[in-house]
Amino acid sequence: MTGLDADDELPTLTFELARDLGEFPEFDLHFDEDELADYHRIVGSTPTEVLPPGIAAIFGRLGYLRKHAMPGGGVLLGQEITWLAPASASRPLRIKSVVESAVEDDRGRRQIVFVTTARQDDTHVATVRIKAGWPS
């Protein structure tokens, strides 16, 4: 995937950092032919010009973890993927992620909701909403 940082030592995305940042830098993401071929081989689908729906699970999480490392103990609590328009496999996606909410209950349990959007050209093509339990 082009658009990834090559840094070996990424800062950990703590609860406080995610809450304080609120939004993450936009970036362009392009899946090359080999990556898409691997994806289709693994899931048993046929390659087409349109990005496969499951790709959203990849860029949904990458939106907030591109420049940060996930802390140990995080748990995926839910994920909603909404495709609004087909996205071309041959053109990059513009990815942006924001923190919709970051809350801690009276028992110290922390949850963060991230919303990642993907645009291609001037079209909003997908939204991924991820709810995660965050370590203390």
Image (cartoon, rainbow, N blue to C red):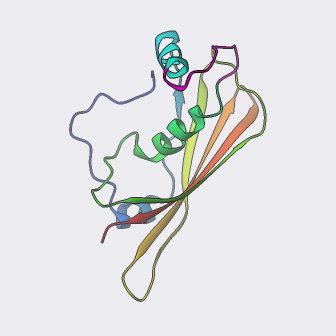
Percent position of residue 67, x then y: 36, 41
In the rendered view, does 125 fall on the left or right side of 128? Answer: right
Q: Is residue 48 magenta?
A: yes
The reply, left or right, for residue 10 in relation to residue 34 is left
Quadrant assignment for the N terminus: top left
Q: Residue furthest front?
A: 44
Say which residue appears at 47% left-offset and 17% top-offset. Answer: 38
**In the rendered view of the protein, which quadrant contains the C terminus?**
bottom left
Q: Quadrant of residue 60?
A: top right
Q: Return the residue found at the far bottom.
A: 106
Position above or below: 8 against 36:
below
Instruction: Name the residue: 51% across, 53% down.
Output: 23
**Residue range of the region highlighted in magenta in the rendering:** 42-51
Looking at the picture, how far across and down is residue 9, in whole percent? 21, 40
x, y percent for residue 85: 78, 32
Furthest residue to the left? 9
Task: Identify whether 60 is placed above or below 12.
Answer: above
Residue 47 place in picture, x, y as percent:
63, 14
Asked whether residue 134 is drawn in magenta, I would say no
Q: Nearer the viewer, residue 12 or 27?
A: 12
Kindly indicate the quadrant of the structure image that contains residue 7: top left
